[in-house]
Image (cartoon, grey):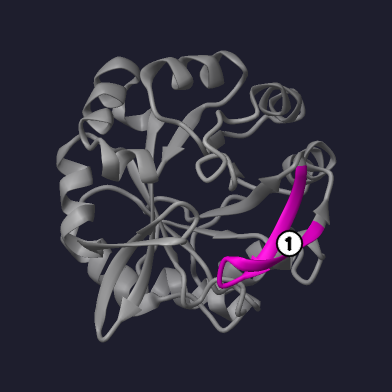
């Protein structure tokens, strides 16, 4: 059985790590380079870096900051935000990213998924999907959750897989920052319908939530931010408890 991964997420705005609730009310969570070094040392399996305002501000990801973070890491490193071309990805990979995460650009130009998968390999391509449950239907949102679409989470996820994505990072906007647990019902459905790994995001508040998302949500990895940034949960303690619960993790 494949080990389950624990992934801290650095949401970056103006060069700083920030965290909000339901995608708003952002507060400062520290220096991304220092946080990255600490997470690599404390047992994180991977690290995700999301330049959350790049798309909205119509600019590229902060390549220099990516390089500074990458130099601190010995674990896989995924970078997202403002990526819209093969050239953008080439720059980020040269600056130390192992994978890239695309979201709004994938919806606007689905063929980008095919292009990136063919050029760099599917293992390099993560498609991030931010979705909100509206009247019982999960609808995809763009530009950091600010722009709703008519796209259905599950239909879009299937298309993403067919186009060559290697992983899906699903964030429930309803659960984001609430610390009430992950969207396990939607995650379990995604896991059942897809053959690629699903990263759960949005809602981590206590160790039991991670256990639930692996057991009930069938997630392959769990991503969280504030509980790690503000030291509410230590990764090594989390992993020890997960292993005690029979969930395979790397210690």
Q: Is residue 251 above or below residue 122?
A: below
Q: What residue do we see at 55% from left, 78% from top?
A: 209
**Magenta stretch bounds:** 16-28
Q: What residue do we see at 47% from left, 31% from top?
A: 99
- Between residue 129 and residue 249, name the one nearer to us: 129
Q: Quadrant of residue 205?
A: bottom right
Query: Would you say the magenta stretch is mainly helix, strand or loop?
Result: strand
List x then y, in percent, for residue 241. 64, 72
Q: What residue do we see at 73% from left, 30% from top?
A: 69
Q: Is residue 85 above or below residue 231?
A: above
- Between residue 123 and residue 106, name the one nearer to us: 106
Q: Is residue 156 above or below residue 121?
A: below
List x then y, in percent, for residue 186. 31, 73
Q: What residue do we see at 28% from left, 26% from top?
A: 117
Q: Quadrant of residue 108?
A: top left
Look at the image and say whether residue 20 sits in the magenta stretch: yes
Q: Is residue 20 left or right of residue 114?
A: right
Q: Is residue 198 above or below residue 13?
A: below
Disc 1: which residue? 228
Q: Is residue 23 left or right of residue 72?
A: left
Look at the image and say whether residue 102 sits in the magenta stretch: no
How many marks can you see? 1
List x then y, in percent, for residue 150. 21, 64
Q: Quadrant of residue 133?
A: bottom left
Inspect this view and state whether residue 76 appears: yes
């Amino acid at each position: 059985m494949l080990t389950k991964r624990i992934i801290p997420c650095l949401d970056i705005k103006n060069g700083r790590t920030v965290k909000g609730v339901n995608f708003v009310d952002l507060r400062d969570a520290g220096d991304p380079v220092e946080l990255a070094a600490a997470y690599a040392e404390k047992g994180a399996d991977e690290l995700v870096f999301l330049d959350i305002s790049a798309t909205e501000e119509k600019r590229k990801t902060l390549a220099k900051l990516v390089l500074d973070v990458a130099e601190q890491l010995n674990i896989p490193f995924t970078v997202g935000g403002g990526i819209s071309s093969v050239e953008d990805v080439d720059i980020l990979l040269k600056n130390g990213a192992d994978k890239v995460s695309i979201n709004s650009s994938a919806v606007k130009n689905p063929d980008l998924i095919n292009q990136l998968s063919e050029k760099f390999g599917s293992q390099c391509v993560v498609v991030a999907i931010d979705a909100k449950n509206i009247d019982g239907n999960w609808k995809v949102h763009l530009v950091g959750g600010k722009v709703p679409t008519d796209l259905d989470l599950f239909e879009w996820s299937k298309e993403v897989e067919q186009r060559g994505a290697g992983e899906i990072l699903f964030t429930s906007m309803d659960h984001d920052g609430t610390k009430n647990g992950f969207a396990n019902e939607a995650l379990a459905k995604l896991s059942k319908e897809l053959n690629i790994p699903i990263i759960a995001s949005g809602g981590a508040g206590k160790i039991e939530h991670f256990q639930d998302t692996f057991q009930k949500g069938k997630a392959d990895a769990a991503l969280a931010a504030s509980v790690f940034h503000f030291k509410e949960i230590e990764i090594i303690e989390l992993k020890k408890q997960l292993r005690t619960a029979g969930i395979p993790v790397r210690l």
